[in-house]
Image (cartoon, helix red, strand yellow):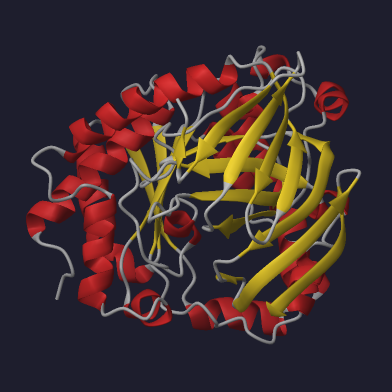
Amino acid sequence: MSVFSKTQLEKYADVLIWGLTTARPGFKKYDTVLVRCDLEGRELGEIIHRKLVQRKCNVVFRFMMSPKLERDFYEFSDEKQRAFIAPGDREFFSAANGNIYIHAPASLTNLKGIDTKRQSQVAIARKFLRDIMNKNEEQGKFGWTLCTYPTGELARQAKLSVKEYSAQIAKACFLNEPDPAKKWAQIYKDTMAIKKWISGLNIDVIRTESKSMDFEVKLGEMRKFLGVSGHNIPSFEIFTSPDWRGTRGRYFANLPAFRGGNYVEEIRLEFKDGRAIKISAKKGGEYVKKIMATDRGASQIGEYSLTDRRFSKIDRFMADTLFDENHGGKHGNCHVAIGSSYTDTYTGDVSRLNEGLKKKLGYNDSAVHWDLINTEDKKVTATLKNGKKVTIYENGQFKY
């Protein structure tokens, strides 16, 4: 039995196609679009497939591994198998024009107890495929979006019924609106004004203060703020990729998280000269330390983000980073990602951003990208390059 009505499913598919074509406006007939779908999200995946075929896209549809397949692979494979890249993957990802991913996990803890090093080996081996897609995106050849489809496992871990969980998704994605895609287009327009304002402030340092943290990031040269670009459904965050070398102070993630089959709670990080020098967590601390040791960039930050509560209707823990990083609630949220940066935050010609320039500008490089979320009441102050201090975010919203 579907958790959404037929009308809601059609609208959800429409919103995802809005996201894909907003993320990359230049889609043409017979472009190649990959649809990746967890088994439990098949119903939505089938509708998206139909709509893309009707738009004359060449669709490649792939189901993701089941929890059992995934666990067996990590448990029984050797190092050589974990480094294996399927024949044709390089060519396929080099040629793909779009990717829609439907996240519908049947288990969030199926990899519990698996050596984290094994997951890191796979991430490192496949990083070059992500790099290919990132490069193609920088050149306007590739676009992507993703969403979550409600499952019993997600609802259980979020301590909600499936009906309640589904209602949260419908509310967050505006599936009960007459025209959700039109609503998203309006939010896209509204947040554009905030991005333009904050990018134009000429910020040097951003300081975030709450009861549990006092945290600073250096914005860096030639940076802009992005968000509500179609990439994630839902997405309300406004973010940038700062110069990792200027990170310092205490960061605290008060929202728990599931990652790689592990559950973690209350992550505390202390940064000095850009790197995490102290790492702890109330639960899953050893896992966090191992992930942050994947490579050098994994203990440095690649993203700083704020979500305005006026846009986001998400007000519950969802056990899903896509929703939790866009939490609105009473205080909005900020999050940082440890690991890789988003190079499209560069204000110059992104297609000319080579490895040497990325390094010079302080863009972080890693096989890891993990969002850590804080929903406490906070004040965010920007020190501008002329020395002036401006409060840019307070009481869960931008001071625009």
Residue 131 visible to the viewer: yes
Residue that extends furthest to the bottom in the rendered view of this protein: 113
Residue 311 position (above or below residue 191): below
The residue lying toward the viewer, choosing from 98 and 271, is 271
Tell me: 285 left or right of 317.
Answer: right
Kindly identify the residue that appears in the image at 70 percent across and 39 percent down: 207
Residue 124 vs residue 378, the one in the foreground: 378
Question: Picture quarter containing residue 169?
Answer: bottom left
**Which quarter of the rendering shows the N terminus?**
bottom left
Q: Is residue 265 above or below residue 374?
A: below
Along the line of sight, which residue is nearer the eye, 302 or 317? Answer: 317
Image coordinates for residue 184, horizontal then vertical, percent: 27, 35
Q: Identify the residue at horizontal 64%, vertical 60% (top origin).
A: 211
- Please report the residue visible at 76 percent of the width from the left and 65 percent of the height from the top: 291
Q: How many marks?
A: 0
The quarter of the image holding the C terminus is top left
Taking the image as drawn, is residue 99 in sight?
Answer: no
Say which of 19 and 143 sits in front: 19
> Splitting the image into 4 quarters, where does residue 187 fall?
top left
**Residue at 86% in and 64% down:** 278
Say if 119 sits above or below 206 in the image.
Answer: below
Residue 61, percent from left and from top? 37, 52
Residue 54, image x, y percentages: 19, 36
Q: Is residue 266 above or below residue 53?
A: below
Picture coordinates of residue 156, whole percent (x, y): 37, 82
